[in-house]
Image: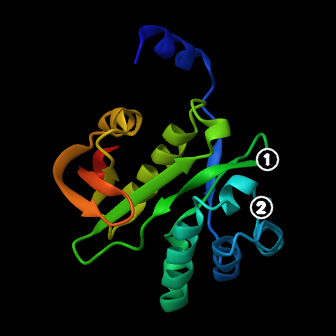
Amino acid sequence: MPDDHHAAKSTTPKPDVRIVQLTGPVFDSLALGDLAGATAAGPVPLTAYLAGPDRRGLWRRRAEQVAADPGSAAWVTGIIWDRQRLLAVGTAGYHGPPDTAGMVEIGYAVDPAYRRRGYARAALESLLARAAKEPLVHTVRVTISPDNTASYRLASQYGFVRVGEQWDDEDGLEIIYETPANHL
C-alpha cells in the first residue's frame, strides 16, 4: 500500500463494530433475498447488499448449517454492525464452531459502499479477540483468493502464515493461512 494510505489510515478513528449473530429465520429470509423478512426477524436493520444475489449462497449454507446444528448459530456468519452509525456494513464470523483440533475458520466481507474505512480490520480483530478467549480454539484459519492482495495484507499483519492451498468449488483456488488463537 502506498505511504499516503497509511497516513490517512492513522488519522481515521477505527470503527466501533460488533458482530451481530443471526438466527435461523433470518438466514432463511436472506437466502431467499427477502430483505424485509430478514430485517423483521433480525436484531438490526439490514441492507440490500446483505440480501443481494452475491450473498445468497452464503446464507443458504448458514441456514442449512443452523437447521442441522442450532448451536452453531452462535459461531457462524453474522453482521458487521457499526455501533456509532447504527449501520450494517458487511458480514463476518466463523464457518462453524471449533473442530476437534480446535481450529476455526473465519470469513468476512464488507459492502463495497463501505470498503477502505477500517471495517474489515475491525471485524478481523473482533473475530481474533473472541477466538483468543475461547478455550476450545487453538488455531484460526482464513482462506484467501491468490488475487485478493488487500485481504492477504490485512491477515499478514495479524500473524497469519501460509500453510497450504485448496480448491473451492464456489471460490476457486484459495490460499490457506493460519495463526495461533492466542496470537494477540
Q: Residue at x 76, y 40 (%)?
A: 84
Quick one: 178 or 65, which is closer to the camera? 65
Quick one: 32 or 40, which is closer to the camera? 32
User: Left or right of 87: which side holds 89?
Assistant: left
Q: How is the image coloured?
A: rainbow
Q: Which residue is mark 1?
A: 86
Query: Which quadrant of the figure contains the C terminus?
Result: top left
- Neighbour tally class for label 1: few under 14, some 14-19, many 20 plus, Cα within 10 Å: few
- Neighbour tally class for label 2: few under 14, some 14-19, many 20 plus, Cα within 10 Å: some
Residue 77 in sight here: yes
Quarter-of-image position of residue 12: top right
Disc 1, SS: loop
Label 1 and label 2: CA atoms lie apart by 8 Å
Q: Residue at x 30, y 51 (%)?
A: 182
Residue 91 position within the rendered picture, expressed as x and y whole percent measured from the top left: 58, 55
Identify the mark nearer the N-term, 1 or 2. Answer: 2
Residue at the far bottom: name it.
Answer: 68
At label 1, the amino acid type is: Leu
Q: Which residue is mark 2?
A: 44
Where 141 falls versus 96 (above or below)? above
At label 2, the amino acid type is: Val
Residue 138 in sight here: no
Q: Are marks 1 and 2 in contact (CB under 8 Å)?
A: yes
Q: How many marks?
A: 2
Residue 111 position within the rendered picture, expressed as x and y whole percent measured from the top left: 63, 45
Q: Residue at x 21, y 72 (%)?
A: 101
Query: Which quadrant of the figure contains the N terminus?
Result: top left
Residue 62 position within the rendered picture, expressed as x and y whole percent measured from the top left: 52, 75
Residue 128 position within the rendered picture, expressed as x and y whole percent measured from the top left: 41, 51
Disc 2, SS: loop
